[in-house]
Amino acid sequence: MAVDRPLPQARELVGGCALYGFTDMAPDVSSRGSVCVLGAFDGVHVGHRELVSRAVSEARDRGVASVAVTFSPDPAAVLAGPIVNATLLCVEDRVRLLSTLGLDAVLVVPFTRELASTSYERFLTDWLVPAARPLSIHVGADFRMGAGGAGTVDALREVAGPLGIDVHGHELVSESGQTVSATRIRGLVRTGKVEAAAGLLERDHMVRGQVERGRGEGASFGFPTANVRIPAETCLPAEGVYAALACDGAHAWPAAVNVGAPRSFGGAQGEPFLEATLLGFSGDLYGARLSVSFVAWLREPRRFSSLEELEATVLGNVAWVGTYLGEGEVL
């Protein structure tokens, strides 16, 4: 699971930017120049991967470093305020996934209201040039940056050209006649279509949170259950039960995962939660950070008339997971 690989120590650059280097080329970014690819990269989906591959290819031809430039927190969260159920990947996981695409480094720019009000001209000359010394910049055709979104591809070219910087605007990747975007993928996840989302992500959709004490129902069925608190901004699938893989960083287990509010016997619903029944695990994960990757939708949430009905349904879900994902540790 690439998303759980440890990150290298970041080097702080101009304006508090953090540079994560992955190859021997990274330390030469500010001296030899680089080819940059800019974007939010939420999800690191197939469109992002295609864009990154263009930048990496040009950087290799030029013999310079390839650098992805992203922002934290997400610009939308700064401009519109925190948005519930909207983030496909936290910034650390964005960096982890970007590191698997052949890039030499990832530059994380702290996005503040001050930066949001900065013109694209100033961002280019005062932030990007000192930090990465770009010889070339790759963006999507619909890319906009700077105050009021005035920094279109054409506008960037006007400023970057005299500085000796090439700007490439690439057509967006489409699938089934629709543009691949983080917005489209969020819509699939929120409606429980995790397998369709995986096709656009080229991986299973993953969320991450901390294990807390739960209700203990899973243990009574003979399977340990991890109750995971997920940050409110994380994009969670629709309520229901899913086949998944749960990983604590070093180990992973098949899991039947319930997303939603407790409703087993028709009582009052509680707060949303994620409850993972782990196959082949023994021990205590309380307090651990756990990632959960959603593999397949199993069923809608429902109320049960008896403990026996609940137990039979849970055991059926666990049996499906055991058949198709395995019954023990997979890492």
Image: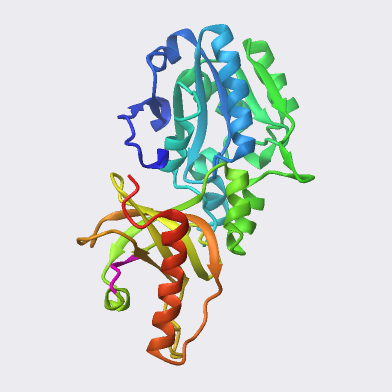
Within the image, what quadrant is residue 162 found in?
top right
Compared across the picture, whether 311 is left or right of 79 comes to left
Across and down, in percent, residue 191 comes to 62, 64
Across and down, in percent, residue 125 comes to 56, 21
Q: Residue placed at 56% from the left, 20% from the top?
A: 56
Magenta region, residue range: 222-227
Residue 110, relative to residue 272: is it above or below? above
Question: 27 and 279: which one is in front?
Answer: 279
Q: Quadrant of the C terminus?
A: top left
**Is residue 296 shown in magenta?**
no
Q: Residue placed at 44% from the left, 24% from the top?
A: 105
Q: Residue furthest left?
A: 283
Q: Is any atom of residue 149 visible in this view?
A: yes
Across and down, in percent, residue 303 comes to 49, 86
Question: 87 and 208: which one is in front?
Answer: 208
Within the image, what quadrant is residue 154 found in?
top right
Q: Quadrant of the N terminus?
A: top left
Residue 248, relative to residue 167: is it above or below? below
Across and down, in percent, residue 223 comes to 30, 69
Q: Residue placed at 39% from the left, 18% from the top?
A: 23
Question: 322 and 95: which one is in front?
Answer: 322
Compared across the picture, whether 56 is left or right of 279 comes to right
